[in-house]
Amino acid sequence: MPEDTEIKAMLELLNPEHIQLDDEQQTVHLLKEGMEIDLGAIAKGYFADQVMAFFKKNGASSAMIDMGGNVLVHGDSPSDSSHWNVGIQNPFLPRGNAAALVSIREQSVVTSGIYERVLEKEGTHYHHIFSSKTGYPIESNIASLTIIADSSLDCDIYTTELFGLDALSIIHKVNQMKHIEAAAITTEGDLAYTENLQGRIQPISG
């Protein structure tokens, strides 16, 4: 566990204005010593989309990619339905226990939550989703956030961008957006989702 002074020093390196991109030379220059770029927030989504593009290019009629938190489907489900039922992990139970099923077709489902990677120190739990303003794990009433969109990369982007908001704000904001849906599970265990998921999401009682 780093000291508070160490965390505050790191915050000085988080300003994206200190990343200099040169499209012509295809170079990236970091203006402050000690800066690094971590693509973890979007890497799985990008690769899932690339793998699916490869499958489609090579004539796959049906496919599912699962990169652990990132699911992307194409074509008909092998079940009786043309749609795929994707489970949303219950953040309060071991892996493999779903809190809800969401029906999708030619879309991606990405879930990010505070339950995946946790450090316990002196009775306090620290999850792995950090605030770039405080340097500490984000504090909100969200236990997990699921985004449904056409591309897995878009899902990654919006789970990262929206996670710091409370459940009501997330659902209200995504309801105003096109081609994207959201489902949030609060730290109290409540499930909230956007209007267009009505009839497409099925909660599972514990």
Image: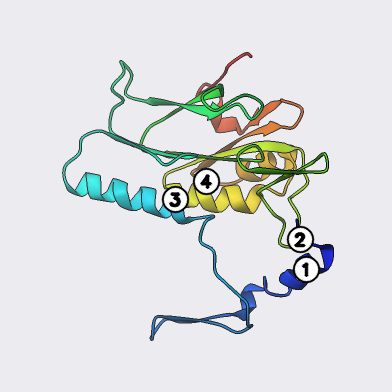
Label 1 sits on a secondary structure element that is helix
Give the side of residue 23 with respect to residue 134, left or right. left
Do the residues bearing badges 1 and 4 touch, measured as CB atoms within 8 Å? Answer: no
Quarter of the rendering occupied by the N terminus: bottom right
Residue 103 location (% of width, % of height): 45, 26
How far apart marks 2 and 3 lie (CA) works out to 28 Å
How far apart marks 3 and 4 lie (CA) works out to 23 Å
Quarter of the rendering occupied by the C terminus: top right
Which residue: 66% across, 50% down?
A: 129
Depth-wise, is mark 2 or mark 3 nearer the camera? Answer: 2
| Among the two numbered marks 3 and 4 on one chain, the one whose residue lies closer to the N terminus | 3
Residue at image mark 1 = 6
**Image quadrant in which you'd find residue 191:** top right
**Residue farthest front in this picture:** 122
Give the side of residue 169 with respect to residue 183, left or right. right
| Among the two numbered marks 2 and 4 on one chain, the one whose residue lies closer to the N terminus | 2
Q: Which mark is residue 178?
A: 4
Type of residue at label 4?
Lys
Which residue: 42% across, 47% down?
A: 151
Type of residue at label 1?
Glu
Label 3 sits on a secondary structure element that is helix
Q: Which mark is residue 120?
A: none
Residue at image mark 3 = 44
> Image height check: is 140 above or below 196?
below
Depth-wise, is mark 2 or mark 4 nearer the camera? Answer: 2
How far apart marks 1 and 4 lie (CA) works out to 41 Å
Do the residues bearing badges 2 and 4 touch, measured as CB atoms within 8 Å? Answer: no
